[in-house]
Amino acid sequence: MDYQNTLKYLYESAPMFQQIGGKAYKPGLETTHKLDEHFGHPHQQFKTIHIAGTNGKGSCSHTIAAVLQCAGYRVGLFTSPHLIDFRERIRINGEMIPEEYVVNFVEEHRSFFEPLHPSFFELTTAMAFRYFADQKVDVAVIEVGMGGRLDCTNIIHPDLCVITNIGLDHTQYLGDTLTKIAKEKAGIIKEGVPVVIGRAQGAVKRVFTMKAKEKNAPIEYARENARYWDMEIVPYSKLQEIRPMMDNTIQSMHEMIEAMDEQSEEEANQMRQALLMLDLSDSLRTLDQILDKRKDAIKIHNEMFPFGLFTELSGAYQFENMFTILKALATLTRLNYNIRSQDYRAGLANVCQLTGLMGRWQKVHSYPDIICDTGHNVDGIEYIHVQLNAIHKTFDQEIHIVFGMVNDKDIRGFCEHCRNMPPIILPKQALNARFRKMNYWHWQKKPD
């Protein structure tokens, strides 16, 4: 078989959730363990980082992978679903798994897995683990498919577990309350393995705290000790203004060092060391990389980066993700991963190029601006609402939205939320059954 026929075989013989919905969902790890044994327990041959959560898994997975790549690690990345090509799911240092590997994997092992009737995701997970082992990755960032406790990725024993947040999604499989869903997500917490939690409060936070205590797992909440952090979305035009200011600051410090050289070599060396620690030249270099892409950015100020850290992912929901990402990276550093401040800068400024990430407030066209985003549930659309409001207030532009949604989502909740979106209104025809079935919404600015 060639690659296209191999994909056709996989889609038709192994049920895929994105195509047929709940019929493809197979809770439990029995089939996964059989596949894992057949392939020689490949996940035991490399380090892993396990990432679960309702929203933000993809952004966190790709960003952590990008920083680790900049730190010199050979990084596997397993995410789902794909947007264009199946191979997006399985990458090493941003490069997709070769078509030949996919074809050979299916041809060589179909006699074993066909009698098992694995789901599409179970088979894809086994393929990813085997590929990462064959290619001798140093570490693999593994994104949970759905839930956590019964997800087939949950056979790994990672160095770090990350749970981004909890929202109401896949409720027919994971539970109809936040605490029920939190218990499923908490199922990835392993004995003695550190865990970082993104957004959590009240009963949800108690679920994670109790599970971590049960597993003797050190637990950290992303927003703890982050009260003095400051984050802002900086438009491309403002980045252009910041650039010469940073350049002038660096030039002034060099001039001070030259003046000190004539008076005190010790003071000059201290100033050079301070300049090196501030990484201003490195900050300028990564800012130039974002400017070259003509992108907006998020600028982060904290104790580690007092003069700012820039990320090219500029969706408003990335604020929450950045707390989680930076806490996770700090934890990995304590676990003896060698990650320098310049690795943070280069990784965050070049996430998309390094990992192939798409669909996170991704600008695909200008004049008019066309933005693609994979937000697909009520929790996600709230952040998009914030950003659309900001755009409207700044530019007073008419906004049109085309939206697609898998039929297991809370369509009614989504519509109700959008109905209350100032300054955007949902037309009445969006509420009729035929229009909902089309999965198409067209919002317009409220009339003056």
Image (cartoon, grey):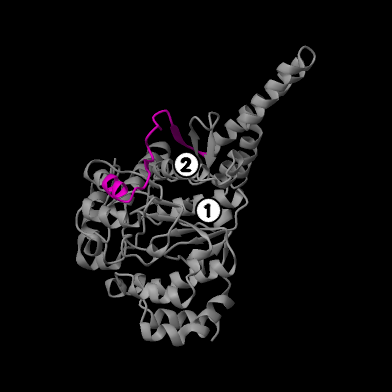
Residue ID for mark 1: 65
Q: Quadrant of the N terminus?
A: bottom right
Q: Does the stretch in magenta take in 424?
A: no
Residue 101 lies, with reference to residue 96, above or below; the image says: below
| Label 2 packing within 10 angstroms: few (<14), some (14-19), many (20+) | some
Residue 139 lies, with reference to residue 448, above or below; the image says: below
The amino acid type found where label 1 is placed reads Ala
Q: Residue 66's x, y, as percent?
A: 55, 51
Question: Residue drawn at (27%, 71%), measured in percent from left and top?
Answer: 22
Question: Residue drawn at (37%, 35%), measured in percent from left and top?
Answer: 224
| Label 1 packing within 10 angstroms: few (<14), some (14-19), many (20+) | many
Residue ID for mark 2: 326
Q: Does the stretch in magenta take in 209?
A: yes
Q: Residue 350's x, y, as percent?
A: 57, 49
Assign a secondary structure to mark 2. Answer: helix
Q: Residue furthest top?
A: 263
Q: Nearer the viewer, residue 125 or 138?
A: 138
Q: Nearer the viewer, residue 22 or 399?
A: 22
> Which badge, 2 or 1, is on the more N-terminal residue?
1
Question: Residue drawn at (42%, 65%), measured in percent from left and top?
Answer: 81
Residue 127 lies, with reference to residue 253, above or below; the image says: below
Q: Residue 115's x, y, as percent?
A: 37, 86
Q: Is residue 252 visible?
A: no
Q: Residue 320's x, y, as percent?
A: 39, 42
Q: Nearer the viewer, residue 50 or 351?
A: 50
Q: Nearer the viewer, residue 63 or 75?
A: 75
Q: Which residues are magenta?
A: 208-235
Q: Is residue 167 visible?
A: yes
Question: Residue drawn at (32%, 48%), measured in percent from left and top?
Answer: 212
